[in-house]
Image: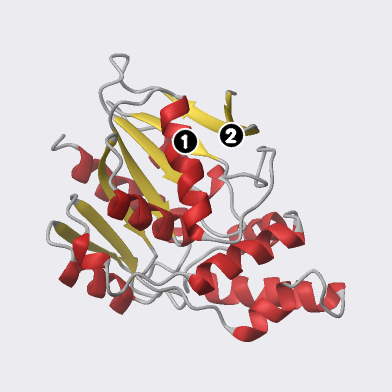
Amino acid sequence: MPYATVAGERLFYALVEGDPARKHNLILVHGAGGDHTHWPAELRRMPGVNVYGLDLPGHGRSGGRGRTSVGDYCDTVDLFAQALGLERASVAGHSMGGAIAQTLALRRPSWLERVVLVGTGARLRVHPLILAGLNPSGDSKTSFEAAIDTICQWAYGPTTSQQILRKGRQQLLSVEPAVIHGDYVACDAFDVMDRVADISLPALIIVGSADKMTPPKYGQYLRDRIARAQLVEIKDGGHMMALEKPLEVAQAVRRFLEVL
């Protein structure tokens, strides 16, 4: 599996080449405390598209340190695309990754074609109890695990299997507490509600009908303010809809990219 050195940090990415001519590229950006495996295989293997599943700094197999602001993560994704020499690429972001994608769309680097916003919003507030529980300088390991349990309870829809739930909890508990806390600090501070209408790129917004963390109204707000946006709702999908309903999410993204 390949690595790229970005601003002195060694970042891992999973690459599946679906277009030898390298004309269509898609960068997948995971959410808080996640890694590239939060995107299903159905989306990471897309005919006709080169898909780059990035592990953000301090996450998954990547080195470096986690960030505490969406803007800093946005810088990393921008530099990652430049380091790989991608002249044109789209970005799909989930949750915090969606905040990163929105920030990129507002900056509009020359390489960015379009964005896919999955389970995200123009503002991402985090419950104070979760922030307090994730804080590595907090009271105990018990409070951290309780915060992770709360996240998992809110993150998955009603039809999710116990196997996916267990795997999701184990993955979050494997993340360095300072990294996941920094991610949620970044989410809590993110707010582009008064700027999101400035996004002029084509945007696909995917919401889960059962998402408790970023409910459908968040996606509807984005759809109503981004001029070239379209909205797809995943029935019974929770916040982790890409893992819960991989075929539905992959099909929506594939249809959106087919017009390129």
Residue 161 x, y percent position in the rendering: 55, 63
Asked whether disc 1 touches disc 2, contact meaning CB atoms under 8 Å apart, the reply is yes
Inspect the image, locate mark 1, and give the three-letter code of the amino acid beneath it. Leu
Q: What label sits on residue 79 in the rendered view?
A: 1
Vertical arrangement, residue 30 with respect to residue 9, above or below: below
Q: Residues within 10 Å of mark 1 (few under 14, many from 20)?
A: some
Residue at the image point whose x is 79% and y is 69% from the top: 136
Residue at the image point whose x is 52% and y is 39% from the top: 54
Residue at the image point whose x is 23% and y is 73% from the top: 220
214 or 78: which is nearer to us?
78
Q: Is residue 90 left or right of residue 174?
A: left
Q: Is residue 248 visible?
A: no
- For marks 1 and 2 on the same chain, the one whose residue lies earlier in the sequence: 2
212 or 90: which is nearer to us?
90
Quarter holding residue 176: bottom right
Residue 41 x, y percent position in the rendering: 46, 39
Inspect the image, locate mark 2, and give the three-letter code of the amino acid beneath it. Ala
Q: What label sits on residue 7 in the rendered view?
A: 2
The color scheme shown is: secondary structure
Vertical arrangement, residue 94 with respect to residue 235, above or below: above
Residue at the image point whose x is 45% and y is 73% from the top: 124
Q: CA distance from mark 1 to mark 2?
A: 8 Å
Q: Secondary structure at mark 2?
A: loop
Q: Is residue 171 left or right of residue 37?
A: right
Residue 186 x, y percent position in the rendering: 55, 65
